[in-house]
Image (cartoon, rainbow, N blue to C red):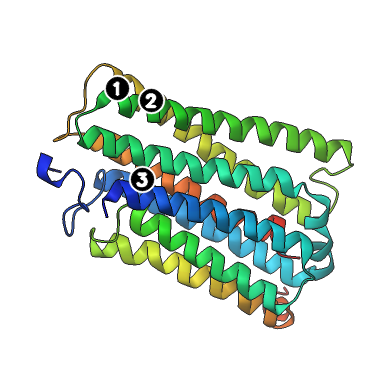
Amino acid sequence: MLLTATRSEQDPAEGRIPGNKGIWAGILSEMTEFALLFGVYFIARAHFPEDFRAGPLQLSLFAGTLNTILMISGSYFVANAVIAMRQNRPEISLRWLILVLLAACGYFVTKYFEFRWNVGHGVTGRTGIFFTVYYYLTFTHMVHVLWGIMGLLWVMARTKTGAYSPQDHEGMEAFASYWHATDLVWLIIFPLLYLLH
Amino acid sequence: MTHKRLIDLLWLLLVALTLAGSYLGETTKPGLAITLIIALTVAIKGRIIVDHFMELKTANRMIRNLMRAYFYVLPLVIVLTTLFGDWLARLTTL
């Protein structure tokens, strides 16, 4: 991975691998795992269409929308962190990473209140097949966000200690790619669980 | 347009698409038209993230194609299961 200062505002070089090969093995495994879970969703939906028609109406669309905006914004913040690092502005990069952390914390706070709201309305994993799928998908996604936060804290510490440079910030790019992938998964979960009636 | 400026605009577009999707989800009756819109929105949002946020537009071809394919296949499955749910149920009955 080598980006010169003159390329800092340009699209990355043709044919390169953002981050490293290892993170892409992880990301493609994550996407495969969720593809299987989405397969379960579609099969369950085909067998129990009424449950899947009524289920989303019992969820908080506000919470789902807020979490989508937080995930999208986290993705945007981390993309900016990478751009700032390429411009040799590590302090600015760290500020963007703090915003990623805030978006991630906002995601968990929203999830906490959403689950509490669900239980208050009698919605648990045993309420019906739709909610079993809902909790399974959202909990699995939460676990992946948690891994991402661990990676984020590591990248923040490395940025703070000056470990990255415009020429070498492979670790930050690898984290950014993972965070975008976790955002992508949520961009599928959101319409499947909250919008499709 | 710089890469930075482009992702600023795409972020706003993604937020707008999300809010519009939620508005449609709440105000419209279920049907094939809304399913098509939702599937198309998933495809567009996915492609924006993959190409510009992940920076795969000019990256390694295999990674780019695998990630892009996800957002062709999945929206298609959303539409097909809406149209042929009964068939899928019969196919997956033990």
Q: Decide which of tag 2 and tag 3 comes sooner along the chain.
A: 2
Q: Nearer the viewer, residue A140 or A107?
A: A107
Please identify, in this view, whether the residue under mark 3 or under mark 1 is nearer the observer: 1
In the displayed image of the protein, which residue is found farthest to the top? A161
Residue depicted at 34% across the width and 59% down the height: B51
Q: Residue at x 44, y 43 (%)?
A: A75
Q: Which label was assigned to residue A177?
A: 3
Q: How many marks?
A: 3
Is there a contact, CB below 8 Å, between mark 1 and mark 2?
yes
Amino acid under disc 1? Glu
Give the residue type at disc 2. Arg
Residue A95: give its label.
2
Q: Looking at the picture, which amino acid does disc 3 mark?
A: Ser
Which quarter shows the N terminus of chain A? top left
Q: CA distance from mark 2 to mark 3?
A: 18 Å
Residue lying at 42% horizontally and 47% vertically, measured from the top left:
A180
In this picture, is A39 found above or below A12? below
